[in-house]
Image: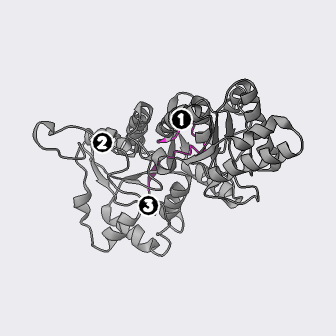
């Protein structure tokens, strides 16, 4: 079998499972006698290659990825590590260096490039490898979706999402007991600037009483906040003196503006609205004004844990499938998880949809209001703001 040279890079925000993807691609390709080159810091690595700052051959990856000493020699640890050994970029530094990027790609002489990224970074990489180039010069891209937001179109799951759900769920479990100990209302802010998949899944799994996501609650209107007060008051009437509230960071504040401290804002809004309702003579809400309401921002903890089993498994499936597609001569494909198996979609179709949604300032793959998860949450008595 003719040996191939394939590159792999990770782009956009990091998430659990990226190293597991690198491992899977490397193992599958090595067994075919192919060489795998790890591109450092996403497409910026191509610039360093073009400018002679990096010897292309120094980027060749070894099968185990890392060499450990002593009895651990040969231990395959990539699937356990969070982050990415290749580094990543979440900014668009490519705009003024397009020719250098493309020259670096040419110098590597790659037969294919495996790009692991989210909707934004995959769009950028696709454009770099196709726009303004003749068809014969197009980069042969195999894309693998990764994002804790789970908002890459056509795929039911992206690398990193499963672990992020587990981390947020565990945090909600832990916060439940401190909330109960002090009769508190705990407002937990989670990631999800445009998509509420993470908040919805983890909120249900973590036993939340209220879940607010941008697809259902674009901003904290008076009626939404009042609905939160009603939900909490009803819990207290039934003897439940604490409450757990999850809000995705993409929900806007009462002024319909993005607020990086939306959790704190919501906590304050609940207290103020409860005070107003109490003043209007509705005694049910008078008690809420005295309840200790706290906000917690989980932040980057959501994306930095060692990957759980599902993300390691999905990484293995995506990585080995990428090598299979390259062997079959398929090009410009996005690997997706659909109906319990790995499939692939034409990357141009995916990118076109992403471009349309981005032009409309919309999420590429938002939570559908008719999603069974939404119905399940409502059936469980969770307030969703609708």
Q: Nearer the viewer, residue 285 or 58?
A: 285
Left or right of 169 in this view: 8: left
Q: Residue at position x 33%, y 70% from top?
A: 48
Q: Which residue is mark 3?
A: 89
Q: Main secondary structure of the magenta part?
A: loop
Label 3 and label 1: CA atoms lie apart by: 37 Å
Is residue 125 visible in this depiction of the protein?
yes
Q: Which residue is mark 1?
A: 178
Image spot of residue 210 (x, y percent):
68, 36
Image spot of residue 193 (x, y percent):
61, 52
Label 2 and label 1: CA atoms lie apart by: 36 Å
| Quarter of the figure with residue 63 | top left
* Sequence-earlier tag: 3 or 1: 3
The magenta segment: 138-160
Task: Specify whether residue 159 is painted magenta.
Answer: yes
Image spot of residue 181 (x, y percent):
56, 32
Q: Of circles 2 and 1, which is in front?
A: 1
* Crowd around label 2: few <14 · some 14–19 · many ≥20 (10 Å): many
| Quarter of the figure with residue 7 | bottom left
Q: Residue at position x 36%, y 53% from top?
A: 111
Q: Nearer the viewer, residue 238 or 367?
A: 238
Label 2 and label 3: CA atoms lie apart by: 20 Å
Q: Residue at position x 76%, y 59% from top?
A: 255
* Crowd around label 1: few <14 · some 14–19 · many ≥20 (10 Å): some
Which numbered disc covers residue 55? none
Is residue 152 visible in this depiction of the protein?
no
Which numbered disc covers residue 78? 2
């Amino acid at each position: 079998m003719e040996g191939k040279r394939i590159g792999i890079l990770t782009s956009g925000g990091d998430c659990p499972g990226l190293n597991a993807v690198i491992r899977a691609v490397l193992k599958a390709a090595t067994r075919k006698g192919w060489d795998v080159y790890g591109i450092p810091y996403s497409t910026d690595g191509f610039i360093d290659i073009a400018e002679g700052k990096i010897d292309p051959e120094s980027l060749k990856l070894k099968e185990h990825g890392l060499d450990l000493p002593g009895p651990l020699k040969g231990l395959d640890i990539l699937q356990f590590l969070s982050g990415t050994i290749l580094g990543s970029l979440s900014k668009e530094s490519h705009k003024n260096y397009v020719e250098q990027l493309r020259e670096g790609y040419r110098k590597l002489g790659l037969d294919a490039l495996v790009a692991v990224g989210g909707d934004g970074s995959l769009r950028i990489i696709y454009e770099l490898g196709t726009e303004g180039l003749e068809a014969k010069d197009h980069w042969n891209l195999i894309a693998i979706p990764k994002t804790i937001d789970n908002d890459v179109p056509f795929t039911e799951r992206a690398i990193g999402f499963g672990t992020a759900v587990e981390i947020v769920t565990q945090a909600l479990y832990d916060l439940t007991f401190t909330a109960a100990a002090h009769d508190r209302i705990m407002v937990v802010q989670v990631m999800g600037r445009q998509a509420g998949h993470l908040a919805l899944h983890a909120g249900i799994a973590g036993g939340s009483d209220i879940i607010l996501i941008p697809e259902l609650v674009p901003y904290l209107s008076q009626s939404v906040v009042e609905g939160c007060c009603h939900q909490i008051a009803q819990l207290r009437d039934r003897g439940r003196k604490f409450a757990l509230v999850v809000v995705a960071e993409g929900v806007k504040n009462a002024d319909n503006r993005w607020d990086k401290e939306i959790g704190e804002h919501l906590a304050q809004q609940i207290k103020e609205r409860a005070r107003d309702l109490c003043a209007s003579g509705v005694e049910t809400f008078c008690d809420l004004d005295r309840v200790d309401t706290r906000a917690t921002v989980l932040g980057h903890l959501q994306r930095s844990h060692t990957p759980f089993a599902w993300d390691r498994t999905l990484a293995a499936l995506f990585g080995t499938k990428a090598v299979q597609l390259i062997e079959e001569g398929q090009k410009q494909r996005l690997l997706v998880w659909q109906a319990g198996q790995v499939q692939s979609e034409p990357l141009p179709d995916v990118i076109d949809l992403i471009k349309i949604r981005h032009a409309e300032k919309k999420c590429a793959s938002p939570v559908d209001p008719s999603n069974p998860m939404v119905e399940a949450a409502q059936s469980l008595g969770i307030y969703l703001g609708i």
